[in-house]
Image (cartoon, helix red, strand yellow):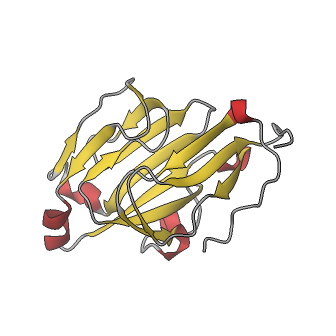
């Protein structure tokens, strides 16, 4: 269980985004990934998935605001203003885009489940890279974040988190 999430009793449904799983895999606490930039929380709060599928899909509705030139990282600005980075693998920037087939471009509007990147995970693992994929809300200090699943094995499109802008709550 990821322990930094707060239990929330009140939400304003007009200001909520649900973060869905972008792939099948094993959900892990971001503090357990082998990269201090992510595990320390410097980039923001989030989660990580050890993928067992190749296709990374949009986990939230929003706009593509960043695609790293090596295609291993994509930024999405959610409709409620949350800024999410999906970082595929650890040190995979060294692959210079090899094994990554990006399906979106800067400025595209995406919906949950829409393909973002097709990744040849088995080839990346064969080269010795960790394929843990981090989902980090870089402006997480502006949001209350709630875990929606306690499953360790997750499937694509499973609800993972709710993200509610702080101060925008009403009774359920």
Quadrant where the C terminus sits is top right
Residue lying at 23% horizontally and 58% vertically, measured from the top left: 94
Which quarter of the rendered picture does the N terminus lie within? bottom right
**Residue at the limit of the structure toward the right, as seen here:** 171
Q: How many marks?
A: 0
Using residue 114 as the reference point, say whether residue 45 is left or right of it. Answer: right
Q: Position of residue 103 (x, y in %)?
A: 24, 35
Front residue of this view, candidates 8 and 122:
8
Q: Is residue 157 above or below residue 103?
A: below
Residue 70 located left or right of residue 68: left
Q: Position of residue 46 (x, y in %)?
A: 56, 58
Is residue 70 shown to the viewer in this render?
Answer: no
Identify which residue is drawn at 46% across, 47% down: 85
**In the image shown, does 152 or 103 lie closer to the viewer?**
152
Q: Residue furthest front?
A: 172
Confirm whether residue 25 shows in the render: yes
- Left or right position of 43 against 107: right
Q: Nearer the viewer, residue 69 or 33?
A: 33
Q: Is residue 100 above or below residue 2?
A: above
Q: Position of residue 96 (x, y in %)?
A: 19, 51
Residue 11's image quarter? top right
For image coordinates 57% across by 47% down, the residue present is 138
The image shows residue 56 at horizontal and vertical percentages of 32, 49
Give the residue drawn at x 35%, y 55%.
Answer: 23
């Amino acid at each position: 269980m990821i322990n930094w999430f707060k239990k929330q009793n009140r939400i304003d449904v007009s200001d909520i985004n649900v973060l869905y799983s972008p792939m099948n895999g094993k959900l892990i606490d971001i503090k357990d990934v082998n990269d201090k930039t992510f595990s320390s929380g410097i980039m923001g709060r989030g989660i990580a998935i050890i993928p067992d599928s190749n296709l990374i899909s949009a986990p939230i509705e929003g706009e593509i605001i960043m695609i790293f030139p090596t295609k291993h990282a994509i930024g999405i600005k959610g409709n409620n203003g949350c800024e999410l980075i999906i970082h595929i693998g650890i040190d995979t920037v060294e692959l210079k885009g090899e094994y990554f087939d990006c399906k979106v471009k800067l400025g595209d509007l995406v919906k949950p489940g829409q393909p973002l990147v097709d990744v040849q995970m088995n080839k990346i693992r064969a080269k010795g890279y960790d394929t843990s994929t981090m989902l980090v809300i870089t402006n997480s200090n502006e949001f209350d974040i709630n875990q929606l699943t306690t499953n360790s094995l997750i499937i694509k499109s499973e609800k993972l988190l709710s993200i509610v802008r702080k101060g925008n709550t009403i009774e359920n």
